Amino acid sequence: MGPIIKRQQLFEIQDFSWTPEGVRNGITDYLQFILKETGMYWPILPYIMRLLQKSNHKTIIDLCSGGGGPIVTMAEGLNAVDKKYQIILTDLYPNTLSFHYHQKSHPEIISYSKDAIDATNVPREMPGVRTLFTSFHHFNDIDAKSILKDAYKKKTPIGIFEFTDRTLLTFLLCLPSFLGMFFLMPLVRPFKWSNIFWTYIIPLIPLITLWDISASVLRTRNVQELKDMVADLNNGQYIWEIGKIPTSLKFNIIYLLGYPKSNLENK
């Protein structure tokens, strides 16, 4: 199924600095819960492993982690392969309470940054494979290109994954998440009274989610648009892979992998 319409650079309310912290964190907490319970991103675990193995990195710098991100659900899978792997959760607006909760759940593999980390200019003192889950669409073309260029220039592996494929089917599959909040929010962990307040007393979390999830689908770049974005980032020493991964939930995960050529590949 092709794109609904041409990509729209809409806004999402949770992106604005004036959005109440409790509302923003509630939205990302709920998204983390849904992605964990559905296992949406499990099919991409082999792709993460490839980036780690090609680069010989043992650390994943998860950017725009929100409420913890899908990388949290894959922590056990990574740990089963190699107990030396580490995950660092980061965000421009760190959800530190949720980050701390996930760290306590997997203290051997998960840590987090309390500082605001800008995905367009990751500090050099944070080396590792970079990942972005369901977040690349938040950036306009200039900033999105900056994320890719920063990894490219610093010869750092990066993996971008989006389940919000810009199709009518994806749009229809995402809409029930709005109604699900009224039944599922008490199950979201860590439990926060702010999530209850902003869902049932003043329902800003579900209302904003309804708009933001719709905007997310319309903002997501398709495979060709991602290929166009990296077309001029090619010096022969850095590889880009772009495609789709089907899931059992009828969603397609759009992925972009970038990594430096190894010495073996250069021969």
Image (tube, helix red, strand yellow):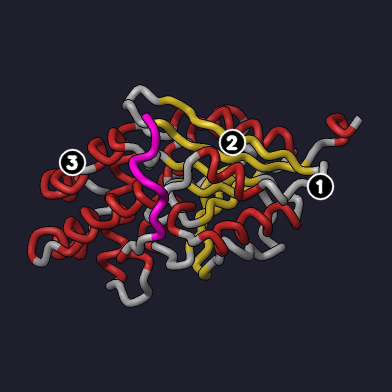
Q: Are marks 1 and 2 in contact (CB under 8 Å)?
A: no
Residue 142 in which image quadrant: bottom right
Q: Residue at 70% x, 33% y: name it.
A: 53
Q: Residues within 10 Å of mark 2 (few under 14, many from 20)?
A: some
Between disc 3 and disc 1, the foreground one is 1
> Which of the two marks, 3 or 2, is nearer to us in this view?
2
Task: Identify the residue at the far right of this view.
Answer: 267
Distance from the alpha carbon under mark 3 to that under mark 2 = 29 Å
Q: Which three-letter amino acid code belongs to the residue tagged 2?
A: Ile
Q: Earlier in the sequence, mark 3 or mark 1?
A: 3
Q: Residues within 10 Å of mark 3 (few under 14, many from 20)?
A: few
- Taking the view exactly as shown, the residue that stands out farthest to the bottom is 18
Residue that mark 2 sits on:
242
Q: How many labels sit on residues?
A: 3
Residue at 31 percent across and 70 percent down: it is: 21
SS at circle 2: strand
Q: Which mark is residue 235?
A: 1
Region rendered in magenta: 1-9
Residue 105 % position (x, y): 41, 45
Which residue, as the protein is rendered here, is positioned at the far left?
201
Near-viewer residue (171 or 106): 171
Q: Which amino acid type corresponds to the residue marked 3 in the rendered image?
A: Pro
Residue 135 x/y as whole percent: 45, 52
